[in-house]
Image: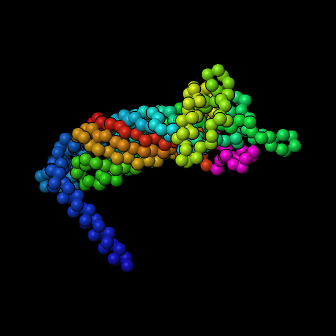
Amino acid sequence: MTIKKYSLILGLLALVMTTQAQSSTEGGNEWKDSSLIPPSRMAQHNEFLNNQYIFPAKPRSQWELGLKIGSPTIAGDVASVRPNFGFGVHARKALGYLFSVRGEFYRGTAKGLNWKETNNYVNNTAWTSNGYKGWTKDGQGNYYVPTDKIFLNHKTTVSDLSIQGIFNFTNIRFHKAEPKFGMYAILGVGATFYKTMVDAKNAGGSKYSFNGIPNGTWDTRNDTKNAVKALLDGTYETPGESNTQAPKAFGMTSRFSQTAGLGMAFKISKKVNVAIENRVSFMKDDLLDGQRYQATPLGEAVLSNSNDALNFTSIGININLF
């Protein structure tokens, strides 16, 4: 069994090497291009060309500068509103054929609006501080029937700073020049800063009356959202509930985050490529959307059993500097 397993592995390696050799022949003699070789390895390159050394010199690892725009969204307790706007910048250094390190910063705004009504917001200070009355309990343990239903909404400003490892799936090239298309995975850690605001008051400073808007269903969700949007003034004047124990920086809540994602890059010239990415940041926080309570059971306002996640889908242009 062991002999068969190693035979299979050797066969696959031979197939990969044959395929790469064919690609190199079809793509040209990139291994002869001295412009890809740094001065420190030029002696090995010349020896290889003159059949005096068995291995070719490793090409230069490049720096890349990237600019991107995209749409941040929050996966949480409030339905996301799309599209949103965000922008980012990164610097990337290749450390080999398959791995590179990237530092990235992006900033954007994510919005949300529920099409299902709720009365179970007794612990959500963004609403109760503005006079809304949902399910409440009296001194005898009896619940008052709510007088105000609401449709949860939020506008969250986010800034995300991270250091990432980029794992290239399509760059096992054996000294072949960069292919026209590449796929890669993203894994990293960083810090996410956010500030959540809620539109809970109208232009006159009074609470909204959502009672006249019927509760949405899946089929009527767009009609319900349109009716709520027509009522809201879009000012987002009320701070969302925040974790008082979480650290603050720049007037925003600060959280350690882990990030993962996938990307595709399309080379349009020797120095320039266009990339499409989707990256998700995870953190131990359920208040990115300003809501951490479940809709049921009524009156209990039970905490949600999952944290929010921040998603950023983007398209960008990357330039190899040197």
Q: Is 228 above or below relative to 42?
A: above
Q: Position of residue 220 (x, y in %)?
A: 55, 44
Q: Position of residue 108 (x, y in %)?
A: 48, 33
Give left or right: position of 240 versus 107: right
Give left or right: position of 135 versus 253: right
Residue located 36% across and 43% down the image? 276
Can you see residue 14?
yes
Q: How is the image coloured?
A: rainbow
Residue located 18% across and 48% down the image? 30
Residue with the most extreme right position: 140
* Front in this rendered view, residue 156 or 232: 232
Q: Position of residue 8 (x, y in %)?
A: 31, 72
Q: On the rendered image, what quadrant is the N terminus found in?
A: bottom left
Can you see residue 244?
no
Tally of numbered tags = 0
- Magenta segment: does it hold 285? no
Q: On the rendered image, what quadrant is the C terminus found in?
A: top left
Residue located 40% across and 39% down the image? 314
Give left or right: position of 301 versus 7: right
* Front in this rendered view, residue 258 or 274: 274
* Front in this rendered view, residue 92 or 206: 206
- Magenta segment: does it hold 292? yes
Residue located 25% across and 47% down the image? 180
Please report the bounds of the magenta region as a residue range. Answer: 291-305
Residue with the most extreme left position: 50
